[in-house]
Amino acid sequence: MASSPFPVTSTRAEAFSHCNSISRLIDFSSRNWNAKLFLTRESSLGRLRRSFTVRNVSSQPKQKLNDPITEEGAAVDVSSFTPDASSIASSIKYHAEFTPAFSPEQFELPKAFYATAQSVRDALIINWNATYDYYEKMNVKQAYYLSMEFLQGRALLNAIGNLELVDAYGEALSKLGHNLENVACQEPDAALGNGGLGRLASCFLDSLATLNYPAWGYGLRYKYGLFKQRITKDGQEEVAEDWLEMGNPWEIVRNDVSYPVKFYGKVVKGLDGKSQWVGGEDIKVVAYDVPIPGYKTKTTINLRLWSTKAPSEDFDLYAFNAGEHTKACEVQANAEKICYILYPGDESMEGKILRLKQQYTLCSASLQDIIARFERRSGGHVKWEEFPEKVAVQMNDTHPTLCIPELMRILMDLKGMSWREAWNITQQTVAYTNHTVLPEALEKWSLELMQKLLPRHVEIIEMIDEELWPEKFQNKTNGVTTRRWIRFCNPDLSNIITKWTGTEDWVLQTEKLAELRKFADNEDLQIEWRAAKRRNKMKVLSFLKEKTGYSVSPDSMFDVQVKRIHEYKRQLLNILGIVYRYKKMKEMTEEERKTKFVPRVCIFGGKAFATYVQAKRIVKFITDVGATVNHDPEIGDLLKVIFVPDYNVSVAEMLIPASELSQHISTAGMEASGTSNMKFAMNGCLLIGTLDGANVEIREEVGSENFFLFGAEAHEIAGLRKERAEGKFVPDPLFEEVKAFVRSGVFGPYNYEELMGSLEGNKGFGRADYFLVGKDFPSYIECQKNVDKAYQDQQRWTRMSILNSAGSYKFSSDRTIHEYAKDIWNITPVDLP
């Protein structure tokens, strides 16, 4: 990993009613949003004096507004008002009627979701505005988190959970003829991320808001996201994601927040010797804001997403009227496509250009916005040397690293600073986190492309690119939010934890989870613990049947591997282990099978990138194995293989609480950290894995006896690959046996020669088993035998499960954010009055 003059972190775990849209716009002297939101429709519609203005969260100074009055003229005393189901139902009915996204005739589930979400958003807007009014007034130092991904998941249950209104909304919707859970299921997952990088960013935003840190997220508003995954007889099929087709009830477009972004052009020197970037292609970005509420706090921070478009004057009206319609719209199409797709394929030059445009758009728009906010808060006396005292910019992985030359360009070319002044400010302001050692994430751009698209930035980069700062490096372990990943997605387990620890404080103070350790052998707790796990498994049964058509038994162990499909994550090792298990079962009598194997449902989920051929072969292989095994009457419920299509946050929220064994089996040294293993452990799921990423620390915390470890260690990997290249590797007979079984055609007519061939040979691209599947295979099989043995003793297994949950207390994103705030950003919590 290259060094940097900026604070750099590495996640290598080894290193350590309203009823009325008017009421939310009125500035009451009280900051109690409950009072503002839930004035009943009957008492507010047509009876409040219309003295209000619309205020942008980020821009205009606060204006004093008149207090609302009743039609009799008396001031409304709402400071002690508490929302109840009736007032919430009134608010939902108001939105169904007056801010509709659907026709008025019926109140079906989709309409109920949108009206409910808009009702919740009203509450968030009031806290949202109050938060940033206060930040503006106090001129606090603020952190800005830039990420190409924010994998948020559904927002409704998270928002009302953070507002402590789950029961009230549940009762309100019941009055209106709907069930809260059914309504919440109507919400599509926001298609703003792909995997762990984006989910980490979303966990961080949750923690920042919950801990009252002044912060803001910046990203891109992808129209289609990555893709929606379908599983067909041919494997994975990609189709465009439709998450925005019905609109997004959480976002607010800020038409007054728009900035220019330039590409191409040339650099010219002025008479004063200053460089200017001129000409080229200009687009506009427009802000869309999404509220991020904290848990049990008024603090509601912002996720600002940029959407791209071209200025209206760039539409070629003459060409359109001449019948050249495509030409007339070309500029608009080129601008808008920047925010169409997350990670567009970059096999072509056009794809590379689009990716680079995306990354620069995020950096340029966000920095322009950050600087505008700094200048506004400074009033008429801007002191640029104070910029690092008011601003901290965090780049989430390599995608936003153009922030560095872009900030230098703005400070020098637009604000008139010298190189030394701009460099000093930039060094103190910008920080970077590296999440992986994989080359596809450590993005590189050719000098030719950079000079063509961003000529001024190339000049600046060449001036920066002359020394290393190793002393700037530090390490942080990632974390996940306990609100979404236990409290809201696993209420049964949450209630048990609260009962046995004697407090609900563990949701914010995760060290209290460690209290469970002293009850791990308690029979009553173990009975409750197993019952909660079974209830969660029962929820998954119907989901799997609906999504895949397969029926599974709740008496089987739920064995889960859900993550991005990649060779280094070794889903191939998992499925080959299953194939070996199936082969051995077929060679036994029915009695022998039941003695040697516990029933398992092996669940996979994850997306293979559209152009990643080998990963798509693995998906196809998994589904083919499932099609054979699941229809084998001799095997029955003793083994099922399920691939869940279109895995996302909402699916994870269902699968993780029901999981009993989770596989984190990447080649040692390849995973920077990982966070899904933390979510599984928190929910009492046992892990099987290599000594890689956060597995290292999880195993230390839960106890080595409660973690199923196998495989080569990181320090051995280079030597093992060298041994392979020299032709000295001798494959284990078990591995040769399973490959031959696959090649026998038992799983259908598809030709798996390319897939099996990648595990053979001594060198060459796509060969020589670079990720050491064959090397670790016998160790993996032996470890799985230990898993079976442990699961047969349910008392022992439950004890291990409790200790996993208890030992996960260190893996909260709250802890991670405290470390970032102290060690990197130098910001402190701000409590709203």
Image (cartoon, rainbow, N blue to C red):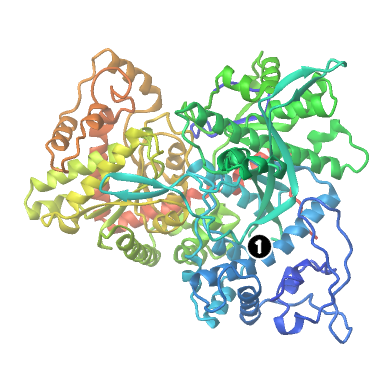
**Left of 153 or right of it: where is 452?**
right
Frontmost residue, 490 versus 44 = 44
Residue 444: percent from left, percent from top: 54, 23
Specify the amino acid type for callout 1.
Answer: Lys
Above or below residue 514? Residue 710 is above
* 10 Å crowding of disc 1: few (<14), some (14-19), many (20+): some
Frontmost residue, 300 versus 609 = 609
In what quadrant of the picture does the C terminus appear?
bottom right
Quick one: SS at disc 1?
loop
Residue 741: percent from left, percent from top: 13, 37
User: What's the residue at 57%, 77% (across, down)?
Assistant: 104
Residue 15: percent from left, percent from top: 52, 30
User: What's the residue at 66%, 80% (across, down)?
Assistant: 87
Numbered-mark total: 1
Q: Is residue 207 visible?
A: yes
Residue ranking furthest to the bottom: 72
Name the residue beneath numbered marker 1.
Answer: 296
**Left of 504 or right of it: where is 769?**
left
In what quadrant of the picture does the N terminus appear?
top right
Above or below residue 283? Residue 256 is below
Above or below residue 388? Residue 215 is below
Above or below residue 100? Residue 543 is above
